[in-house]
Image (cartoon, rainbow, N blue to C red):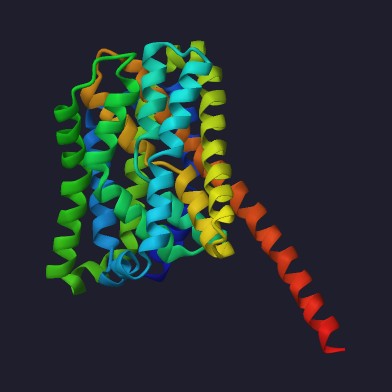
Amino acid sequence: MKNIKKWSNILSSNIAVLIIIFSVIAFFVPKGFSWATNYTSLFLGTAMFGMGLTIRAEDFKVVFTRPKDLCIGFVLQYTVMPLAAFALAKAFQLPADLALGVILVGCCPGGTASNVITYVAKGDVPLSVGMTIVSTILAPLCTPFLVYFLAGSWVEVSLLTMMISVVKVVLIPVLAGLLIYRVFPKQVDAVRELLPLVSVAAIVLIISGIVGSNVEKIMTCGALVMIVVAIHNVIGLLLGTAVAKILKLEEKKVTAIGIEVGMQNSGLAISLATANFAANPLATLPGAVFSVWHNISGTIYAGIRNRKRGTGQEKADARAAAESI
């Protein structure tokens, strides 16, 4: 079990590397991975089910004991990224498919990878987990409504159909995981170390499948999508951090909110594009690119926050030493 835990931690913390490796392989051997697009919703549902199995009762305490912090994070999550996506789609005059894909990413809840990055950045992990739980559970309402209002000028959006899709691939699997853990806690704890591996495999297959199915389209518009996605993600990280600082939150909370706002559940964006916008095949591409990029940028952000915190701590220690003389 120790070896499993070791490999689970290694693969989970290096998911961006895995996604890049398998995406490159899928690009050159598309037939080996394009089949995975037929099971996008299943893979995402599996990852969400795994998330539900890992949520413990104490994780919900933050929801009730720190409502102010969660409220700030929730509002930023569902305003900064959706509005930034809409503005970028307009500014770059994106075609309908790509505009829809970028907006879908912007309107999704926070991704579970943000919890890992927050841990690496020495941020407030309970707050990060709480924000992910709240934004995910409320996604069946927030995501479809935001997509309906923001993407409606590009494509026709069925609000009810989208709500049903989010309930199927996000809410039901998460709640099922919660229920099973409550009924069989010992059995789930016995295989808990395997759960991150399942989620990693599901996410890697989703992204590789998208790449394998869109090789020609990536050749023609991949650079544009990469630029827009990178700007979108950086806007989320910077504005999330800036607003949290303006509100004078503790540095650990600032880190958690910055990461949570900037990192989206791009797998959900891909699943929604696949299930609801079959006539717009390129809509899956921004989500696939975002899945790779936000893990890379999140790791860089974590390093920057760690260095700043180290410098700040050194100054505080120096001041304390001077005062003691």
Which of the 4 image quarters holds residue 35? Answer: top left
Q: Nearer the viewer, residue 196 or 163?
A: 163
The residue under the point 12% across, 69% down is 183
Q: Position of residue 161 (x, y in %)?
A: 15, 28
Residue ranking furthest to the front: 247
In the displayed structure, 29 sits above or below 6; it is: above
In the displayed structure, 254 sits above or below 87; it is: below
In the displayed structure, 39 sits above or below 191; it is: above
Q: Position of residue 69 (x, y in %)?
A: 42, 60
Q: Is residue 31 visible?
A: no
The residue under the point 57% across, 37% down is 234
Locate the C terminus by quadrant: bottom right
Which of the 4 image quarters holds residue 250? Answer: bottom right
**325 horizontally vs 162: left or right:** right
Residue ranking furthest to the bottom: 325
The residue under the point 33% across, 32% down is 269
Q: Is residue 209 visible?
A: yes
Q: Position of residue 310 (x, y in %)?
A: 71, 65
Residue ranking furthest to the left: 183
Locate the N terminus by quadrant: bottom left
